[in-house]
Amino acid sequence: MKKRVLFLLCMAFAMMAWLPPQLWAQTQPSGGDGSIESPFLITTAEELKWYANYVNGESGDNVVHTTACAKLMNDIDLSTVCGKGKGNWTPIAKYGIYTFNGEHRFDGVFDGNGYTISNLYINDKNGSNLGLFGYVTPTTKKTSVKNLKMASVQIVGKTDIAAVCTSGYNATFEKIEVISGSIAGFSDIYGISGCRGSAKNCINRADVTASRYNVAGVISSIQDEASNCSNYGKITTGTGWAGGIAGGSDGFTTIQNCANYGEIHVTGTVNSTDYAVGGLLGYPWNIEISNCANFGNIYLTEQSEFVGAIVGTVQLKKASGILANTCEIYVGGAAQANVPVLQSGIKWLEDNVDNTATCIIPTAEQLASGWLAWQLQLNCGIQTWGQNISTEPKDAYPVIGGSVLYAEGSCTDDLSAATSFSNNPGVVTHKFTHHDAVPATCSKKGNHEYWYCSDCKKYFKEAICENAYTDDADPETGVWIEMIPHTLPIDFDENGVKYCSVCGHIEGEAPMLVADEASPFNGYYAFSKAGHLVWLHNQVQAYAAVTNPSPIESIKCYLANDICLKAVCHPADAAKTWQRQTGILLVAKTPSKAYLTATNTLSATCTSTAQAAISGCSGT
């Protein structure tokens, strides 16, 4: 027996040695099927590794799963599956399997769900396309990765390297933050994405180094837009094509409400527009820039006319909003005098100088007081720029998504020229009334507790008037609560009706639609119960709610039996109420015909059989 057990153990170890490394240390998630409606629910590093192999066609079924979706359900520490002594992380949708115009294009969606992936490790000095994801090129423009944080990222390679996605195009990256780490290589090195696409609400804090060229804090090249993005990491390049937010742009794109706080170091020579360097954007090609700021210094070894505080010296389409700069440009350790926000060498599309931007070099007081953040926010439709100026540690600069600033005065005053600010909403005066929370019923909407200001017409969540609801029933932001369903029995009664036990709402059973070409009533609804008339009434009410003026559709129906309306409208005063509420008038024309007309809404022709009649409803 012992020999048999020993033999089986040896066989097991032999099988493990035979298996490819990508099949070790992986576990299939227990939740989800990988569809967009039911993504794989990732709870461990081993499950994330399985997902990578599944997408890459290396999970055992030898099928490349290009549309597989996943969602994190926990923070994930990858140190159990990659690191020194454990090997490198294999990118999801790795290059080679996924290529430009190749057979496979990653079309899935990865939702970080607000969780953090830590300790991504890749050390391959000759490697390329190294990151959490490899090559991402969805079949249509879409958000491919969202709601994700990454910490302690350590990647060393040669080309096309980034924390989240190494290369591709058409993808959007939204609400992503690289909290810490170091990303380094020879060329095409980026903090978040090397994929040409869009970046929204992204933050990079990792240091990013390209010993040669092509480097940026957030994204390689803007294909559509970069908005509400920030870089705090140190950017280092050998010869240029570098920016705090993006290296370049594809043309006719936008960058708005973005800020760079990280230093940019150029160790070589920037000698042409092809290698331009800018605080936010290195190579701007026919791009619109609006409401952006650079607070990071730029360090050069040699003077270059292709380096700018905000953008490199290439070509813009339009500049608007606020463009602010506090950076110094150092050459050989010496700060250059009179650094402009936008340098004069910049060209404009078709030589049309479309520049309405207010260029600002703020004073120390304007920075510390929140004045610059206030000016930037004035150009935004929603809360975007803020700054903590009240409690330590204070923000030295305006921050995208930072603490909200308030200016003293009435909520309806024009405070665009304000100079004194606070993080306390109490400095703004409102005329408000308090409203208690009211639960929703089946007949009336409810509301959350709120304070309504009659001046600015806002619904605030608290008496300090800091956070406002939207004037709708949005489940996450709205002040109102939608009506709840009626409390109805499961089955219709013998009259074909149901009553709500709370509000008395009545619903009628749907009649049968005759589908018999040989019948004279083909295409007619057969009315044989009081509930069928209630059904007609509710059809009319539904049309009236969504259609104005009345629709051209009509409902044809016939009386298949005598119908007594005592169950729905009796005695006579109830009958009048029924007629008033339904808008249906019964007018006898001949002994064998009657016409039901829905006033102002819907035409409904009702033909009776020779013996059928409606009774029990006086007042018609």
Image (cartoon, grey):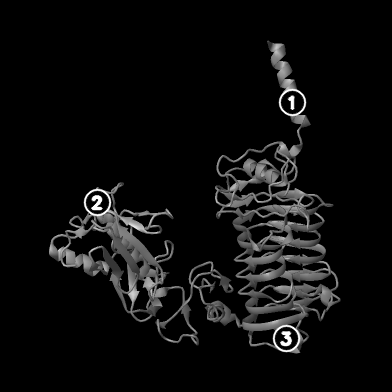
Q: Earlier in the sequence, mark 1 or mark 2?
A: 1
Report the residue marked by disc 2: 495
* Distance in Å between CA atoms under marks 1 and 3: 70 Å
Q: Is residue 534 visible?
A: yes
Residue at the limit of the structure toward the top, as seen here: 1
Q: Is residue 312 left or right of residue 428?
A: right
Binning the other alpha carbons within 10 Å of mark 3 as few (below 14), some (14 to 19) or many (20 upward) gives few
Q: Earlier in the sequence, mark 1 or mark 3?
A: 1
The image quadrant of residue 339 is bottom right
Q: How many marks?
A: 3
Q: Is residue 211 left or right of residue 226?
A: right
Binning the other alpha carbons within 10 Å of mark 2 as few (below 14), some (14 to 19) or many (20 upward) gives some
Instruction: State the SS at label 1.
Output: helix
| Three-letter code, disc 3 | Asn
Report the residue marked by disc 3: 338
The image quadrant of residue 100 is bottom right
Which image quarter is the C terminus in? bottom left
Report the residue marked by disc 1: 13
Q: Could you tell me residue 272's position as x and y percent? A: 85, 77
Q: Could you tell me residue 540's position as x and y percent? A: 33, 66
Q: Residue at x 30, y 69 (%)?
A: 597
Q: Is residue 461 visible?
A: no
Q: Earlier in the sequence, mark 2 or mark 3?
A: 3
